[in-house]
Amino acid sequence: MSVSTTKLGLAVVRAAQGRDEEAEALLHEAIEGFALYDMRALEHWALRYLAEFLAHGAETTMPSSTKSAAPGSPRRAPRRSSESTPRPATR
């Protein structure tokens, strides 16, 4: 699974770089890996990336429905500005 998720991430990077052929090949490899290990939720997630990529090319590297965290990954709170973050007292 780790190899497939890495390939999926690299495909997004390659698409952003305009390397569409390589991005598409990596997406297909990631999907095959998820299917091989019966990881249906991740396979579906990767298929959404592929569908968006094929529909819109490199103009969008992430489907609008998957801009949130991946399934099973922790959600992060938005960062605060540095002004509102209290600083430790110095002695």
Image (cartoon, grey):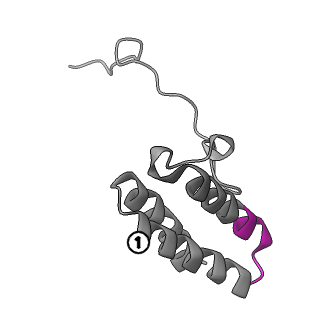
Q: Which residue is mark 1?
A: 22
- Viewer-closest of 88 and 75: 75
Residue closer to the observer: 51 or 64:
51
Residue at 35% in and 12% down: 83
Q: Bounds of the magenta span?
A: 37-44
- Dot 1, how many residues are within 10 Å of its Cα: few (below 14), some (14-19), or many (20+)? few
**Tag 1: amino acid:** Glu
Q: Residue 90 occupies which quadrant of the picture? A: top left
* Image vertical order of residue 56 relative to residue 88, above or below: below
Q: Residue furthest left?
A: 91
Q: Number of numbered discs present? A: 1
Q: Is residue 75 above or below residue 8?
A: above
**Residue for point 68% across, 57% down:** 48
Q: Nearer the viewer, residue 20 or 32?
A: 20
Q: Quadrant of the C terminus?
A: top left
Q: Position of residue 79 (x, y in %)?
A: 47, 27
Residue 34 location, quadrant: bottom right
